[in-house]
Image (cartoon, rainbow, N blue to C red):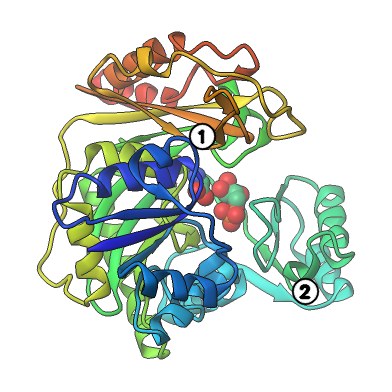
Amino acid sequence: MNILLIGAGGREHALAWKMRQSPLCGTLFAAPGNAGICAEAECVDLDIDDFAAVIDFCKRNDVKLVVVGPEAPLVAGMADALGEAGIAVFGPSQAAARLEGSKSFTKDICRRYDIPTAEYAVFEDEATALAHLRKVGAPIVVKADGLAAGKGVVVADDMETAEAAIRDIFGGAFGAAGAKVVLEEKMEGEEASFFALCDGVNVLPLTGAQDHKRAYDGDEGPNTGGMGAYTPAPVLDEPQQALVMERIIRPTVRAMAEMGHPYSGVLYAGLMMTEEGPKLVEYNVRFGDPECQPLMMRLRTDLVELMQATVERDLAGGAADWSRQAALTVVMAAKGYPGAYEKGSVISGVEQAEEDPRVKVFHAGTALNGDGALIAAGGRVLNITALGEDIADAQQRAYAAVEKIDWPEGFCRTDIGWRALQRLRQDGA
Ligand code: AMP
Ligand code: GLY
């Protein structure tokens, strides 16, 4: 079966690498891809916002399955357009992608189906939102309703910060994404991610992971797309995963089906592990990046088979098999990220880093220059990923591989996995 993969990040490189291991995978195309993906797949110059062009490409190249990595094409309706043309898409419809595209949509489902999450209220004008804020006080979390590239959330510990955030959003800082503001109770606890495959009706649990969102060591500095991740997540053990399935994932999938928008694809629950149990922070309608990279290292089941079962509504009774080992990813980013950074610096040492058979370097923002040398072409650039006996061993292998990368213009955090190691030490003590 020929497959087209949409995306250009480390997540998509990991998906391409894993799909290529499947005997079901015929020619794998990628649009737009990156220097690493192009080693696994045939990268094609295709305008992915032009659904008619994507459909035409699929028909001409006998593509039977399109796998969408990022959320934006799904929120824009790619699965609907391709589905109408008879092409199967791994990823939800536009209506179902509202689980990520609209925070108020998701919160309203939580309320109706009694899914544990932070208390909230939704506002369509500044004066009413400010009046509510004065009534409930800080700390409080202020969110733009729509997609804001991860920047539309302010956890405000005082009134001034909360007021400024509300004014910013209604002032147009996030365009249409800020037409509504959600004010939420601040939850306390450790964050974790849980992933499940859904075929509209049936749900197949995958597993848990944790990422590090802040740019610098000690979880300090600005928020980023994610500077590292690992799986399994010690805070999300088997009993906690079962709770997440029963209280959060299954009711959501039931809600979507009952509303006439059955959810198909991977559902990523961002969770807060509170004293009262796991609560939903947000949904994403795609794999996490970088969480996907260590997940793919541990996945033993054929990924194409799982994706096919998802699009064919055949997940009932299925299960995914995971290596008992741990996997950990260290993100190498261009100096300056998540602020301004330079592109074009040359990177070497990737092959040396991969001399350890349990290390894989997934590319994010990379390209080849005119001489065929690997260069940085984005903010997050490389994902050094290692399997190990446990988190500590995976961490040690990943950082040993980082040492072999020669890229003076890049940086990484030196403490990916610290929270897991601290918890494991406490539990062992
Ligand atoms: P979101 O885009 O909704 O995932 O929010 C981004 C980040 O803000 C989350 O990963 C949390 O760290 C934090 N956050 C969001 N909502 C809450 C909440 N209700 N309580 C505490 N932290 C939150
Ligand atoms: N790593 C966070 C995300 O993919 O949204």
Q: Position of residue 80 (x, y in %)?
A: 46, 81
Instruction: Find out if the beta carbon at label 2 lies less than 8 Å from the nearest ligand 1 atom.
Output: no
Quickly name the residue at label 2: 179
Which of the numbered marks, if any, corresponds to residue 285? none
Q: Is residue 233 visible?
A: no
Image quarter of residue 135: bottom right
- Identify the element where label 2 is drawn: loop
Left or right, residue 140 beside residue 98: right
Residue shown at 58% from the left, 26% from the top:
375
Residue 292: give x, y in percent of width and height.
Answer: 38, 44
Label 1 and label 2: CA atoms lie apart by 29 Å
Q: Amino acid at mark 1?
A: His
**In the drawing, does residue 135 fall left or right of residue 429?**
right
Q: Nearer the viewer, residue 133 or 2?
A: 2
Specify few, some or many for label 2: CA neighbours under 10 Å numbering under 14, 14-19, or 20 or more: some
Q: Residue at x 83, y 51 (%)?
A: 159
Q: Position of residue 114 (x, y in %)?
A: 42, 75
Could you tell me which residue is drawn at 38 percent across and 60 percent down? 4
- Please give the name of the residue rendered at 49% of the width and 63% of the height, measured from the top-left corner: 117
Side of 327 where 219 appears, left or right: right
Q: Earlier in the sequence, mark 1 or mark 2?
A: 2
Mark 1 residue CB less than 8 A from any atom of ligand 2: no
Question: Which residue lies under the disc numbered 1?
Answer: 212
Query: In the drawing, does residue 275 fall left or right of residue 345?
Result: left
Classify mark 1: residues with Cα within 10 Å, few (<14), some (14-19) or many (20+).
Answer: many
